[in-house]
Image: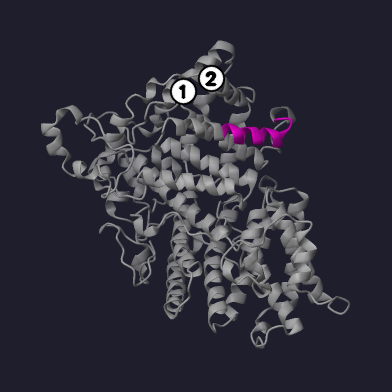
Amino acid sequence: MTRPRDGQNHAPRSTKQLGASTGAQSLSTPTNAQHSPGANLLSSSSSTTRIIPSAEIEFFGSTAFPAIINDDQDIVNRYVGQFCDQSILQFCNADRSQEHISEKQIHEGRTVLNLLVNFPAFTDCIHRYLELSYTCMVPDPFIKACVLSIQETILGLKGSRLRQLAVDLFVNTSKPLNLFTPVPAKDYHTLFTGPNLRWEIIGFVLAILGISLKYDVNKQNASPRSLPPDKSDFIHRIAEAVEYCTSVCYSYTCVSHQALWLLYGDACLKNLVYGDMSFQFWRCMGDLSSMFFALGLHHENVKFEETHPFYQLEMRRRYAAQIYSMDKTISTILGRPPRISGSHCANIMPADIDDGVLLLEGDELYSSLRNVDANGWNMDRQFRGATWRRIKLIVSQFREEVLGVCLRTHFTDDSEILAQDILTRHEIVWDQIPQELKYDELTRSLHIPPPQRYVVMTTYMDQKYNCFLLHRKLVNETHWMREPLYKASISLLNTVLQVVSLSDQVYNMQRDISWSTLYYGLPGASTLAVDLLKDLHHISSIPNSQIDVIPRAEVIQNLAIFIANLQKSINRREVNQKPCKWAHAILSGILGEIIDPKNREPTTRETVESQTAANIQFSPNSGLDSDSFNFDDFFSRIGSGDLALDTSAIML
């Protein structure tokens, strides 16, 4: 990860740390073993019989008490044969599958299954959604295979047959899944679907269905009869069903990649149903980060590279990169320390390849993996989901350092030096990413199709937001120039307005855009609005000689459009409508004072808060630098956060 200069990196020696140096080599691909098929390229083929060393279901580090035995496992196995085929978890959980399944559980399970049985159009909804999604943690081919298998399994089921399916799901879920299994990629889904169907997969598919319905991506192409009559109620029932599936998996202590799918889908759906700042979403992210470490996604094991199928290892890197980035996102928006530390993570950079490459084997796979440049970017310069995931990881690695500066309790001279160092390295590393894969604010990257362009714009705003946070911290704590802060603010405001405009122009992208408005746009808009207001009334004791950097007429016009977009989110009753109401009320007052100050009483913190507190049940006291809330620091009180749960999939 991008560690501070004076910090010591404890990652394995073979790991390449992105952004750790200012040279071009900092963006080189991870070790050759990671993306090269090597001697075991055919490991995913079923045509070769091999003995695969078992992988522990849960990860235990060097300080765990089983570690001493594990270090000398060969010797122990040689002389203590009765335990040689059984890990400590398998030994402790040997009788879990014998637990009785009650009639209440069966009834609840049938109720969950009926959500899919009684809505046969769920497959079409999910497929249309996946056509627009570029950021799903689980590759499309595997999701589609699961959806198709479930459709075949539940087709026409009712009565005793549906009851038996519910029983089978409980029995299957009680059995632990192997961490790795040597099956071809095209057959991977058969391990947990069909006769092996589990609650993890039912819950995950329901979560994707809920997200699909929430985004209305099916409204234009689907007939009214193929959609639920009361969509809002149906989505809430789906959310409850997904939570039920997670509770079942908790009761059976499910630790697997498929359990990770479920927790991921649950977090993404809760984000859409309850909002970015909800405790439900925050709690789900805690569960997700716990599974992250339990599966050892932060750990690099060279033996795995030599013995296990490439597609399974590559998917683990995708999981790790995405969850790491999500952790930095929610930490920023809530102003809370990250749960996943980069200092404990080995190399988790995924390959810049299409999802379909994961299904290849042999020479075809080898040829596809060679289609990258020296820094690991695809030679075709096509922006794909894996490209987004790589850029997002790079920005999130820097975001962890940014959070370390912004959330620390004391700001020292060393903090100032570190902040400047991060800014320098961040710019160099960002410049090394191919220009064709980044958003261009001048040309607006019109050559990129709208759904992809949206994702490209979010990565651009993410890196701008890193700079914004550091510049703002330096301005507040030192005599740092305000000009870089203004430029970053203007860029964020202009780009988020382009995002909203793009969403309005493209029917399939008309969705809840309140999070991007609040997360990316509001910090920049607030900075510009408050400083224009302070300059108007000469509030600051020190004249702001750099206020002329702000193009006043253009910014006022864009602020008016931004406020109108906040009102649009309120009218649509989007999930973040309360924060939008709060921001709309305050920014409207500030802009009105800037435009026409003659017949208005001066705007003060007391006036604004008294006008909004009675009508809007939303606490402004969340976000970065919570120890210094005042009107001068207005925007920080609305949660200057980073909800990078991308709208094209909310990280799905």
- The magenta span reads 228-242
Residue 157: which quarter of the image?
A: top right
Relative to the observer, which residue lies in front, 175 or 37? 175
Q: SS at mark 1?
A: helix
Q: Main secondary structure of the magenta part?
A: helix
Q: Residue furthest top?
A: 160
Q: Residue furthest right?
A: 599
Residue 374: which quarter of the image?
A: bottom left
Which amino acid type corresponds to the residue marked 2 in the rendered image? Ile
For the image, the number of numbered tags is 2
Residue 187 in sight here: yes
**Is 369 positioned to the left or the right of 543 in the image?**
left
Q: Mark 1 points at which residue?
A: 170
Q: Which residue is drawn at 49% across and 28% down?
A: 199
Q: Which residue is drawn at 70% across and 74% down?
A: 530
- In reply to whether residue 114 is colored magenta, the answer given is no
Q: Name the residue under label 2.
A: 106
Q: Do the residues labelled 1 and 2 touch (CB within 8 Å)?
A: yes
What separation in Å lies between label 1 and label 2 (alpha carbons)?
A: 9 Å
Residue 296 is situated, as x and y percent measured from the top left of the image, at 34, 45
Q: How crowded is mark 2: few (under 14 residues within 10 Å), some or many (20 or more)?
A: many
Which amino acid type corresponds to the residue marked 1 in the rendered image? Phe
**Is 229 positioned to the left or the right of 19 in the image?**
right
Residue 127 in sight here: no
